[in-house]
Amino acid sequence: MIDFWTEFDKSYRLFSQFCDSDDWHRILRAVAGAVIHHVELTDCQLSLLDVGCGSGVASETICEQIYSQTRCFPSLSVVEPSSIARDRFSANILANADAGPLKHSFRTICEIPSDFKVDAILFLHSTYYLDDLEKELRRLVDSNLRPGGAVFTLVLPEQSPFFLGIRHLNNCSDAVESIFRALSLKTDSFELKSRFILPRNGALTDAEADRMRKFFMPNAPSCADFKSRLREYSNADGLIDFRDHLLIGKKKMRQ
Amino acid sequence: MRFLDKLARGLRAAKTWLLPLTHLLGFVLILLVLTAMKRWTIPDSWKVPPLAAWEFAALVHVFLVAQKMMDFRGFEYASKRFNSWIRRGVLNVIGLFILLKLATFFFETKTTDEKGILSPLVTLGSSAGGTVNQAIELVSPYILVMPLFFFFLVNVYARHHVIMRARQLRMLHTDQELYLTGLIKFVDLPVILPFSLMVGYLKLDPVCGPDSEGLVVGIIGCCLLIVSNLLTGVFDEHWVSAAGRDR
């Protein structure tokens, strides 16, 4: 796994300030809705595994959404290799561990015991950082996903304008879909909006632009070039849509 | 490499700037070329359908605008397959209408021989020819109406698909649903419904012969195709700027 948090943490936090928070909340609501729709709740029991949970805020929001829609609180387990992210995750969620949804926390997928079973596995923009997604997914689906359970991945499409030129961003939408098919998972997809809002006067400072450029468009040679590409990809209202894809791979009841 | 990169981005930017103008220029250019062809290259002995140039220009205009509109990033909540299908499908069908118009143009063109007798430019074998002529007569007046109905069907089907998919995610009254409902209410229905009534009236009116009927339907069809494109564009702009929302 690429150590996302040590390398890019500050850039990512800066980037997230400019994202449309309404869109992001709607996406998390959609993921929660998809989990409820695709995974059968037996006796109000639902267990989730979030792979690459980062700061844990997203998976916690999904748990809250599932509760508000079903009145059943799901149990949450997470996989997060970065110590920086784990610290943040601890600060955000582990403090509430007694009352909160968190049940297990693993550093890597290999640490998960084979008798540990979940109903839904989440990859929220985390597939890019796995070197061999097919191998890891096969392991999770075969050993840890209950029959009738599903894998939910939030991924960018290959053609997403903002991530053009990022050479190490593996496993985007089409690649994940073909892996689902290779694993004999029944695949479904949803296109969702995920927008980045440029400041009204277009005034990103050079320091801000440079920090974001290094992370999101390393092939842009300068700040000016990065800014001009942002303008090029934005619509008349200064919005850039990343087009998040929600891909669902459902495991058959008997496989 | 850097030069090529700059050139590619420059061209993309220029394309964005020129799009509305290119559409207008394309429309006028096609009209001029076809009118000139009709005036100077087609022999005097040929009797071509009166509105052919306008009809081609209107259809190509619709094709260009559809190409731009289908360049959007997809209906929200729709599946990837649906969005890619609709992009390809719309352009292919409009392309098909253009080819169909071209075919009817040749089948409807007549030539005058030395004795002054009119005969079709293209003649097929007796059995096939009869069927083709019947089909052409049946389809020809309505080719311009077809894109209007087609866009109406696409919008209705897309709305149905988007609502169904959004419900699967437990999303109610989404922006996408409102947008498509508005498009049907304010663009499709005001254009298609009066046109259908008018075609029905012309069919029932005994005074109106097939030639004048074809002419009226042709002229109004051309205008409506362009007006519906304009209305869609205006609705789009209004939607985005009024609510700060993207489609």
Image (cartoon, grey):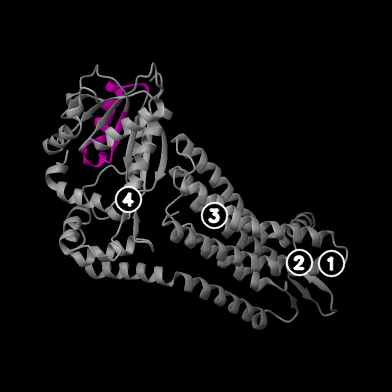
Crowding at dot 2, Cα within 10 Å, few <14 / some 14-19 / many 20+, comes out as many
**Residue position marked by numbered label 4 in the rendering:** A20
Question: Separation of disc 2 and disc 3 at Cα?
Answer: 26 Å
Assess whether residue B125 is covered by the magenta stretch: no
**Residue position marked by numbered label 2 in the rendering:** B214
Q: Amino acid at mark 3?
A: Val
- Which type of secondary structure does the marked residue at label 2 adopt? helix
Residue at 57%, 67% in the rendered image: B60
Crowding at dot 4, Cα within 10 Å, few <14 / some 14-19 / many 20+, comes out as some
The image shows residue B107 at horizontal and vertical percentages of: 72, 65
Q: Is residue B95 left or right of residue A228?
A: right
**Residue position marked by numbered label 3 in the rendering:** B90
Residues flagged by tags 2 and 3 on a common chain: yes
Crowding at dot 1, Cα within 10 Å, few <14 / some 14-19 / many 20+, comes out as some
Question: Separation of disc 1 and disc 2 at Cα?
Answer: 10 Å
On the image, which quarter does residue A124 sit in?
top left
Residues flagged by tags 1 and 2 on a common chain: yes
User: Which is nearer the N-term, disc 2 or disc 3?
Assistant: 3
Q: Amino acid at mark 2?
A: Gly
User: Which is nearer the N-term, disc 1 or disc 2?
Assistant: 1
Q: Amino acid at mark 4?
A: Asp
Tell me the quarter of the image containing the C terminus of chain A. Answer: top left
The image shows residue A122 at horizontal and vertical percentages of: 30, 32
Question: Taking A111 as reference, is B228 above or below it?
Answer: below
Question: Separation of disc 4 and disc 2 at Cα?
Answer: 52 Å
Q: Is residue B169 visible?
A: yes
| Chain hosting mark 3 | B
**Residue position marked by numbered label 1 in the rendering:** B208
